[in-house]
Image (cartoon, grey):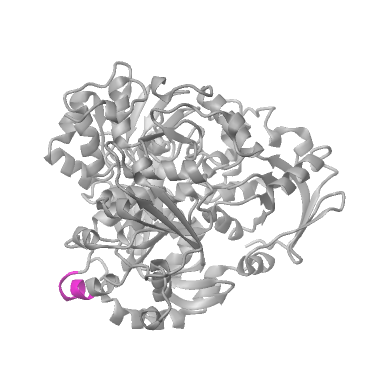
Amino acid sequence: MNTLINTSPVTLFEKIWAQHRIAELGDDTALLHIDRVFLHERTGSVALDALRNDGRSVRNPELVFCTMDHIVDTFPGRGDATRMPGGDAFIRSTRDSAYRAGIRLFDITDPRQGIVHVVSPEQGIALPGATVVCPDSHTCTQGALGALAWGIGSSEAEHALATQTLRVKKPRTMQVTFDGTLGAGVTAKDLMLHLIAAHTAAGGSGYMLEFNGAAVRALDIEARLTLCNLAVEFSAFSGIIAPDDKVFEYVSGRPFAPQGLHWDQALDQWRSLWSDEGASFDRTLCVNAGDIAPMVTWGNSPQHGVAVNGVVPDPAKAGDASQRQSMMRALAYMDLTPGQRLAELSIDAAFIGSCTNARLSDLRLAAGILKGRRVAPGVKAICVPGSSQVKRDAEAEGLDRVFREAGFEWRESGCSMCFYAGGESFGYRERVVSTTNRNFESRQGPETRSHLASPATVAASAVMGRITDPRMLSGN
Amino acid sequence: MDCFIVHSGVAAPLMKANIDTDAIIPSREMKRVSKVGLADGLFAGWRYTVQGGREPDPAFVLNLAQYKGTSILLAGINFGCGSSREHAVWALREYGIRAIVAAGFGTIFMNNCVRNGILPVVLEEADIQALADHSSEDPQQRQITIDLQVQRLYAADGRMFAFEIPANDREMLLEGLDPIALTLKRQQEIDAFQQRDKTLRPWIYLRPES
């Protein structure tokens, strides 16, 4: 707790870093305590098995959690079988390894099952001021609660399991301020797609981001999770938001959150989790949220974003040769020409799901547009709730009926068609508007053309059968 | 873990910006609960003529005769961005890649490289392009040499490029160290930290599932 007696102002990140530092390893690298490790079935059993084969054990199994999301099927009535060849082996082997290691597993039929970054906040596993790691790049999502949460590889997961620590090189710090007020139809997703388009997909490389400003304060917790989710698409180490009363209210009463006397103690400490006035950041970016329109991506990098009512950009105006080449390749892949209006593009499919945008508020937003409307003929539309809990909550308020009546498939929870999870993908060269986070070549299917957007934009596009500004369709 | 001290090899250019780990190994190619058997899936979307197929696409750089035996990749900015899948690094290593020279790396990917004996070298994009232009005239003869001890990269014509790498990563690669074994030697420090921390943040230390 050195930070509390330190008189020079420090950032939120530095406070959490100092509290978890066990030893200095030189060259700005520290051995940090890891409070929570989360695994999933794609890398979970690989890491647990490798550890066991090396004659090592899990140091603190009570601090390790595992869910089934990356390979599991999302069809109603699912079991261990998936369309992915060999997929069931990942599921069974993870179940066996988790059982053997004594870690908590949210198995396929467990009511707590879902996408790791939806489940962790939902169950009170990620907490303000805690360190959370998972062999998944979108672990940064959980920074929305004021946790220091970041994605790691399998080898580092083994390290965290065996020692409950990680050797971490301290990233630089960047303050990202979204001032002003969000316009109608504009969401946290749009803020981040705008930021990444303006500063490139590598713009946050080597930095720990802290998001603040009036527009961030005004976001509810689920929208903040979306904001932090996309920190990794900016190539940041992670993102964090100082926890406030909204966070404390969100965390309170969740299954693994502190209770009773521990809650009071925790709250007392969490109230000091902010960047001191005058704390210095290595870099500062400031954006007026009021200037941002609903965004959609046109290319194969999250930086290829434009306003949904805008046009495909011209590579001739690119900053340098390498960006120009990457744009030209993306134009060819996406079958687009410079100057073409995005809103003219007809779509084959619409997908609402993933750790980015499949929480209850996302589904409500989409359902508000879908209510009383139908998906355009020929458009395949799928909704995959972010967790089994989100699915039950949505069904309790009748959202499943809205989706079904509009012509959407209503699925079980999992990562699904964000990336071929469950062995499912969209068709050859199909054009998809998607609430997911990556528009990489062939990520959602063979030469599939993915356009990233908010749940509102995806719902509006599904109805119109082409990319559509959600402000054109008011919610019913 | 394999050491990396000094290495000479054929260098292949993949100068596109933001090459993501989905491109390095697509999800559909991660078929087994294993760290091995992944080299076949390396760059599968670009390397083969059809998705899921195994007929080499003659246009892809690693399929060209002059790049046979490639062990060094030359790349643009932000190589290995995206998914944290370490399968990307396992596939590269199994294919025979020992070093990647790029204008920047995804953070998780870079950590994964170091833990699997692949050296990530960061140089200016213009220098990498110059290296690619030079070696591509005769890749088998114009090999690149990288000496981690002195942190220098040499083109076949003798041009030298100095590079930086975090000291701990350098040591890990030079000596082939196992970071878990190193950390386990600090067991007592970790015990002491947790004991102290339990009084400060008792809510972090959950009870085992009954």
In the image, farthest residue toward the right = B157
Give the quarter of the image for residue A435. Answer: top left
Mark yes or no: residue A355 visible: no
Q: Return the x and y of residue A89 as percentages of the image width and height.
A: 41, 45
As for residue A260 lying within the magenta part, the answer is yes
Residue at the spot 15% in from the left edge and 72% down from the top edge? A260
Where B129 sits versus A155, above or below?
Answer: above
Image point (37%, 80%), residue name: A1
As drawn, is A409 to the left or to the right of B59?
left
Query: Does B13 appear above or below A126?
Result: above
At a point 44% along the width and 36% down the height, the residue shown is A85
Residue B168, how many percent across, how many down? 61, 69
> What percent of the width, then of the height, locates residue B35?
53, 51
Residue extending farthest to the top is A377
Residue A462: x percent and y percent? 30, 25
Dominant secondary structure of the residues highlighted in magenta in the image? helix
Q: Which of A157 and A455 is in front in this view?
A: A455
Callout count? 0
Q: Quadrant of the C terminus of chain B?
A: bottom left
Q: Quadrant of residue A182?
A: top left
Q: Residue B173's quadrant in the figure? A: bottom right
User: Viewed as shown, does residue A14 lie left or right of B88?
Assistant: left
Please give the range of residues in magenta.
Answer: A259-265
For the point 41% across and 68% down, the residue is A11
Quadrant containing the N terminus of chain B in the rendered view? bottom right
Q: In this view, does A379 lie above or below A71?
A: above
Asked if residue A336 lies in the magenta stretch, the reply is no
Residue A290 in view in this figure: yes
